[in-house]
Each structure stands twice: as structure tokens, then as C-alpha cells.
Image (spheres, helix red, strand yellow):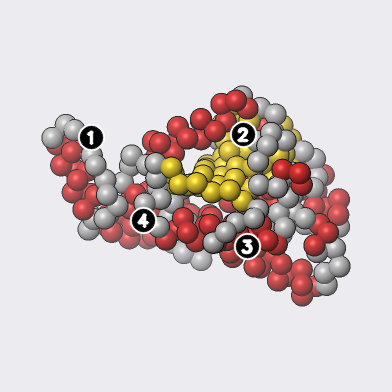
Amino acid sequence: MTYQNILSELRENILYVTINREAKLNALNKATLAELAAIINYATTHHEIRGVLLTGAGEKAFVAGADISEFQNYNLEEGKELGRTGQQNVFDAIANCPKPFVAAINGFALGGGLELAMACHIRIASENSRLGLPEVTLGLIPGYGGTQRLTQLIGKGRAMEMITTADMITAEKAAQIGLVNEVVPPSALIARAEEILAKIKQRAPLAVASAINAINASLNPEVNGFNVEIDEFGKCFDTADFKEGVNAFLEKRKPIFKGN
């Protein structure tokens, strides 16, 4: 697939994905969401990919929201479909992907941009980042999982305040309340995200995927997360990577995991 709104590059088992609409502060339009859905599916299904680094083009914005002009005249059913399609194909697809997504937040992460970052498994922010969910200023609420994931990450009280006031917060504040994992200087942002992914790709890929599934299950009221953990734990024993990991430990060497 040829992409018009994103850049992608596979390098040393890490897929680099950059939302490339710098003139629009990388705002999410329909075309960009469709391309993101395609690249997420690619990452999910290609064995050689061990992780994804997601960022925005330029220095001003990760993603400064959705392209409002595309849905300003939507009715009730069209609004529901907009939210449903985006949730399933992009935001939930990232959260449930067996490959870890690391968001490198470079500047504004607002509205759909913050929701995109929150769908990722790990978030690193540059010191100049500003984060927020301003949808109520447009007569809307977050529609791509923002009310749910923000509450899960920072708690009901803080999520209620951020969403109902529409206030932006600094990267430092975001780290204090658990919205991002770490804050670094802008010049160190990509390198820090790469450092995290470099560690992860040395681990057993199937075990990483099992861990993601079990952790996600802890937030799903429809399943018993402990049972999911037991199932995923048991599945690991049936992998070649488990045998390699144990043998490497006993032989006092570094394991070589192949994802099988």
C-alpha cells in the first residue's frame, strides 16, 4: 500500500511510523485513519516486526486532534459510525496488537492525538509537549476511547477534570499523574523510545504478546484477568522460545529468541 499521510520504515525489526501532515499539525482525517489501520494490520501480521515507534512529523505536534472539517455536518448515526470505525480499526487495534507500540509524543497531543497516544502501550513525551482532550469546547466528548483510557490511566477524578475543563497539561504534569511513562528533552525523544524498543525486542516475542494480552484483560470487566494470565502462562510452556530461554539461563548465555 502506498501511503499519502504517513511515513513507514522497517529497521532492525522495529517499524517506524510517522504521521506526516506537519502543515495540519498531523491532524487525523479519514485518509490518515485508514492508512493507520492498514499499517497496524501490517505490524500485527508480519513476524519480523518486534515493535512499533509511533510519532508525528515536525517539532510542533504528535497529533493535534482530528480534522474537524470532515465531520462538522454529521448526524447522530454518522457520528456513531465515525467513533465505532475509528475505535475498532485504529485505537483498539493498537491497544490489542501483540507487538508493543511506543508513542514518542513530540509537541501537542490533543483530542484524537492524545487518544492515539493512550492506545499505545508505552508513552514517552518531550519536555515541550502539551496534552489534553478539548472536545467539550466543540460540543463533543472524546470519541476514540478517551473517556475510558484516560480514566484507566489517571483515575476518575483527574480524568473528569481534564475532560470537562478541556484544559491542557504539561508533559511534566502528565508524568506526575501517570499519563506518560517518561519525559525527556526533545532531542532525546526518539532515542529514548528506540532504547525501550531495543530492550523489548531482545525478549521472547510470544511472551511479550502474552503479557500484553494478560495486562489488557485486567481492564476488561467481561473476562477474568487471572484466568487469562493462567492461559497465557501455560501457552508459553509450549513454545521453542521458552526452551531457549531456560537453556540460555542454565548455560549462562544470552538467549536467541525466534518467536516460535
Q: CA distance from mark 1 to mark 4?
A: 21 Å
- Up the image or down, 230 lies above or below 202; here it is below
Q: CA distance from mark 1 to mark 3?
A: 40 Å
Q: For mark 3, what is the residue?
A: 34
Residue at the outermost left position: 251
* Residue 47 placement (x, y as % from top left): 36, 55
Mark 3: give few (<14), some (14-19) or many (20+) Cα within 10 Å. some
Q: CA distance from mark 2 to mark 3?
A: 25 Å
Disc 2 is placed on an element classified as strand
Q: Specify the quadrant of the image occupied by residue 70.
A: bottom right
Depth-wise, is mark 1 or mark 4 nearer the camera? 4
Q: For mark 4, what is the residue?
A: 47
What's the residue at 60%, 25% (across, down)?
Answer: 187
Nearer the observer, 95 or 9: 9
Q: For mark 2, what is the residue?
A: 125
What's the residue at 57%, 30% (across, down)?
Answer: 189
- Lower position in the chain sequence, tag 2 or tag 3: 3
* Residue 42 placement (x, y as % from top left): 47, 59
Residue 48 appears left or right of 18: left
